[in-house]
Amino acid sequence: MQIPYNEELRPDTGLYNAKLGIWIFLASEIMLFGGLFSAYIMLRVGAPVWPPLGTAQLNIPMATFNTVVLITSSVTMVMAWASLKMNNFGKFKMYMGLTLLFSAMFLVVKYFEYSAKLSHGFTPAHDTFLAIYYTMTGLHVIHIIAGMIVNGYLWMPGSKMWKSNPERFTNRIEVAGLYWHFVDLVWIFLFPSLYLL
Amino acid sequence: MIELLGNLSEHLGLPVNASSHGHMLDQMNGWVHWLMIILFVGWGIFFILTLVKFGFLNKEKVDCEGVKSHAGTYGEYAVILFEAFLLVGFAVPLWSLVKTDLPDVTDETVEIRVVAQQFAWNIHYPGIDGKFGRTYATLVDEEVNPIGLDRSSPHGADDIVTLNQMHLPVNKQTIIYLSSKDVIHSFSLPEMRVKQDAIPGMSTPIFFTPIMTTDEFLLEIKGSAREGKGFEIACAQLCGNSHYRMRGFLTIDTEEEYNAWLDEEAELLEEEGDDDDW
Amino acid sequence: MSSQDHHEESFISKYIFSQDHKWIGIQYGITSLVFLLFGFTLMMVMRWQLAYPDTVIPFVGWMFEDGMLSPDMYNSFGAMHGTIMIFLGVVPMVVGAFGNYLVPLQIGAPDMAFPKLNMASYWTYLAGGVIMVYSFFVPGGAANSGWTSYPPLADIATTGQTIWLFGMVFLITSSLLGSMNIIVTIVQLRAEGLTWGRLPFFVWAQFVTSFLLVLAFPPLEAAGVLQLMDRLAGTSFFLPSGLVVGGEILNVSGGGSPLLWQHLFWFLAHPEVYVLILPAMGVVAEIIANNTRKPLWGYKSIVFASVWLGFMSFIVWAHHMFITGMGQGMSLFFQTTTMIISIPSVIILSALFITLWGGKIRFNTPMLFALAFLPMFGIGGLTGLPLGLAPTDIHLHDTYYVIGHFHYVVAPGTIFAIFAGIYFWFPKITGKKLNEGLGKIHFFFSLIFINGVFMPMFIQGLAGVSRRLADGGVSYAHAAGVLEWNEFMSMSAWLLGVAQIPFIINFFMTIFKKVDGVADPNPWQSTTIEWTDTTSPPLGHGNFEIAPVVHRGPYEYSVEGASEDFIPQTKK
Amino acid sequence: MSHDDIQHHVKTYIKVFIALMFLTLLTVGASYIDFDISPQFRSGAIFVGLAIASFKGYMVASEFMHLNNEKKMIYWVLGLTVFFFIFCLSIPVLWEANLMGDTNFEQSPPKIEGGHH
Ligand code: HEA
Ligand code: HEA
Ligand code: CUA
Ligand SMILES: [Cu+2]
């Protein structure tokens, strides 16, 4: 049994299944982070001073560095897809590897950030600002890890599909890429909301 | 006709109304229920007719076009109009009347605070000076000072705090500042048509004017199942295992009775103060 | 997303980790029936407490200390009844079972767009269910802060609440996966010629429902994460400063907002109630069209109305929060949207009524349930109006009136539609019709007793009796006049339980009944694709020998000049 | 998409990359400038910060995620989502402004030596 439109496009919608699927998934992700941002706003509006007195000073240089890292990983991700489109599997391997490398770098920096905060007693329980900071960035980190698992799979074992079904493999990379750019996009908003404003 | 329409509320089994605004809410409730009954009966008749006519009698031919008249559509417009009427005519003005147009405080206004907790109502009267003392969470002591009142704060010395006993004078505008110590409760006075969530971290004003004393009320309910039981404060929001018996008592006094009660409480306070320094 | 052509399937891949939407639909169906029965049983136990407080519960009393439900237990059972009925019973039934089984068949697709995801969604659901049931056995018992789990109460509740939150995360994830799948399937896999205007209304209802799930559930997931943080990491998202619980200052930073939870919760939970009703309306519409032998009256307008309903359902949520202290502006907004949202329901119901006019009505069991749905949903919907207007809600909020309102929409509403659907599509699934005689007994007794349970709730509610009272209102004087109804309602509830026995017997009897010869593939003479070109019961993975091509609309019944009184959608 | 198209895309990606880098530095820089009329609400800074973030987000979405050239169906889905998203964000704010109750009534309790008990 064959499900239609897994790789070819359905004429009236112009889409293959997974493309629509990922966008609907991203729509739900938008609402997920929407709920969190809504919480952030409500806490902020309700607080007499924001950030609350005595809270931790977040590390802006570190976060800026991380922003740069994540944006770069987004670019390498889209380059990985473009390489496949240009039939250059070797370049794909390189770009995808870079994407993974940058993602890992992001996590390492994040680890240092967290541990620096925690070691000074700035736990989530300290105040509502830190609570929302840990929750939002934590959820974002989980998204990064999930993305790395998918990307890692497509980079190594999953890339065998390039031989058997290049069309479909390219689609998979596009879909993984869409997710990855979304994770990047969330960070683009988290960064100013939590660190700068 | 209007009389009759408005009076449907008297047949809904609502509790006796004892506040000045209550009858307006009841009347609105009556109107809404009229709309509901008309719609239900109207469609119900159509429904039964249809089932009889096309279910049991007519078994030959199907009329695919079905209903040709536009009665259904007109019905829908009628519903829309009625709902708009309810919104504009009742809902909006009534909401400000009973919830948001906080009356000005005058000499005649009774102001009290109610602090809910698991599972009791603390009633806080400002005392003779008419001003509330400050309260602090750190001062809370369930035995002697459940609301954490600071007796040494400027207006705190004469404040009266009762447990589950709320007295109010009849025919006086009352403002209650409602809050909670722990979880969300809901302050409900069914006969006053008052209900308001008591949310911790928030102080919400409610206001109403009782128009019936407890004695009058007891007379009114003579012969009913609750004979002999006066007004009560109910908790309408799940707040823990004893939510079901988080019951307070409300007594509506005449002016004289009320003042006498306040004096009595003030005396009690003084006696206590002698052997207990705050 | 597998596309490998498989050979012989093993038992495990065929029946346990199946990727066939039909089998997954059946898995969903059976599991949710069990949960429905479980949720109902909890309530039957609770109803004993309400009718005869302080007496030992018969049959199951030995399970509890003193043979009675303690107030804590009562609250646990109440919260779990709500949760189980909604998230483990009705939603998996109407979306998971009906949606999964019927949508691909009705649109002529070979399967769901993502079969593996479909399988994952069932197993995630089951995991969520197991977690929820497990919570009864942790110290302190299952969650006991209501299905609404309002903090601060839920924040300081026993361990059961944590388990409840974990369970919810699973259930939400499952619903998200399932509904994504349904949307993509409907958009991408419709058969040739099956335009949007030719979709059966049921498919439209599933489409709108899935969007509600995809967009409304995530904020609750976010809220769930925040509550988990509050409970496990000691944060104070929902805890304001200065809380004193049981005489002790709560050791938290404070600064949070209890109302934040209510916003996020109702942002989901209001659309959620339309998730419960829309597929039910879809089922009822299919059955009514089929059994009046008539096209649905006003197909376009009810499709439009259901889309509108879905859209509006996102912007009415605060009508559950009228008495938290909102000002004029917000109350005006939410009352208005609430009144507006009642209009599409009126349109859909009117259209269904009008469809009956001029038809040749067949009173078989599915049709009886579908017909009863209409006035029953009518009562439930109409009693939503006084709740939706803020001033009248002051008196009715959190009373049994609310309980009556929503049970009329979910129990004789949705549950009846589910029964109708089961009786209607049972021959599709098994090749055998359920017994009509038993079916009618099931129907008439259910109808009588379900009204016996819920009608008196309006009387109690109008008298001001609060909900969630472990003693049914004995403590309150203002409940005294209507207290005697408790016994009547409980009796009705147990008899309603008894009335389910013919159904259960019927269900299993028919499954195991042997019949000779080939089953009639289209026993109801229906037009939609699931009855044509496939065998009943369907065999194996994959739906159609030849991909169907659709030539006409979904309800071509009694067409002038046709040889039979229906023309299948696939007929030229 | 043909080979040339892709080549063209790649050029755009590089340009967007550079722009994003620049904007990141800009937003960090801007956060040190005081745009505010009142120190309480910091509305100026919030506006500038979010404006830059939105522009960055727009570039990622339109270029990397190809939203500048997508199919109708996807625009529908996203349009709907964005509508509800904005709703979900704005109501809490409006709500706070329209609340009858007073959320800041309880001043933080003084730290009393020894506390109670
Ligand atoms: C399937 C579920 C479902 C449905 C469809 C609805 C539909 C509606 N609901 Fe209900 N509601 C719930 C489930 C549902 N609700 C639940 C579960 C709760 C409580 C949650 C909790 O607190 O635990 C609740 C609570 C609830 C409240 C909060 C009450 C309170 O806590 O104080 C409100 C207030 O506005 C409300 C309003 C409405 C309205 C206006 C509709 C409208 O959409 C209804 C529109 C329908 C009609 C107007 C009917 C049309 C009728 C006819 C055309 C005539 C029929 C005549 C014959 C058949 C003869 N509902
Ligand atoms: C979909 C939702 C749903 C459904 C269907 C029901 C169904 C029923 N509910 Fe409930 N209920 C809720 C959702 C639901 N409920 C919610 C959300 C609450 C609020 C909880 C809270 O306060 O937090 C509530 C609360 C609630 C209360 C109030 C408790 C209180 O406030 O203290 C009561 C009281 O009588 C009640 C009763 C019933 C009864 C008698 C039924 C009956 O109609 C049940 C009928 C059930 C069936 C008919 C199913 C039969 C199943 C089978 C026969 C399966 C057969 C199996 C096989 C063939 C394998 N419910
Ligand atoms: Cu307090 Cu319920
Ligand atoms: Cu609602």
Image (cartoon, coloured by chain):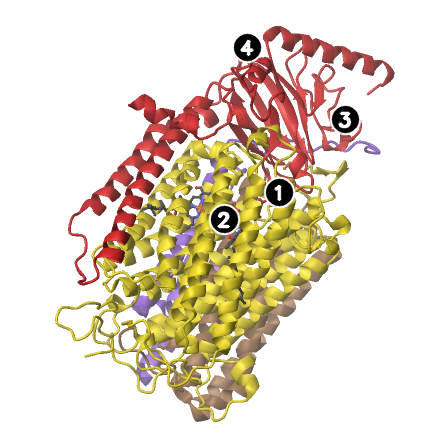
Q: Is residue B62 above or below residue C157?
A: below
Task: Say which residue appears at 69% left-offset and 20% top-offset.
Answer: B133
Residue linked to disc 4: B108
Write down which chain is painted red.
B
Residue, disc 1: C51
Q: Secondary structure at mark 2?
A: helix
Q: Are marks 3 and 2 in contact (CB under 8 Å)?
A: no
Q: Amino acid at mark 4?
A: Glu
Q: Which residue is mark 3?
A: B145
The answer to whether the residue labelled 4 contacts the one labelled 3, judged by CB atoms less than 8 Å apart, is no
In the image, residue C22 above or below residue C8: above
Nearest to the observer: residue D111 or residue C169: C169
User: What whole-number distance in Å separates the C-alpha atoms at marks 2 and 1?
Assistant: 31 Å
- Per the model, the C-alpha gap separating discs 3 and 2 is 37 Å
Is residue B5 rendered to the left or right of residue C358?
right
Q: Residue furthest left?
A: C561
Q: Chain D shown in which color?
A: purple
Q: Which residue extends farthest right? A: B275
| Left or right of C184 in this view: C178 | right
Disc 3, SS: loop
Count residues near mark 4 (Cα–Cα under 10 Å), then give few for <14, some for 14-19, many for 20+: few
Q: Quadrant of the C terminus of chain C?
A: bottom left
Gap between marks 1 and 4 measured at Cα: 46 Å
* Residue C380 visible: yes
> Is label 4 in a helix, a strand or a loop?
loop
Badge 2 sits on which subunit?
Answer: C
Q: Colour of chain C?
A: yellow
In front: A74, or B108? B108
The numbered mark at residue C266 is: 2
Of residue C252 and residue C139, the one placed in the foreground of this image is C139
Q: Are marks 1 and 3 on the same chain?
A: no
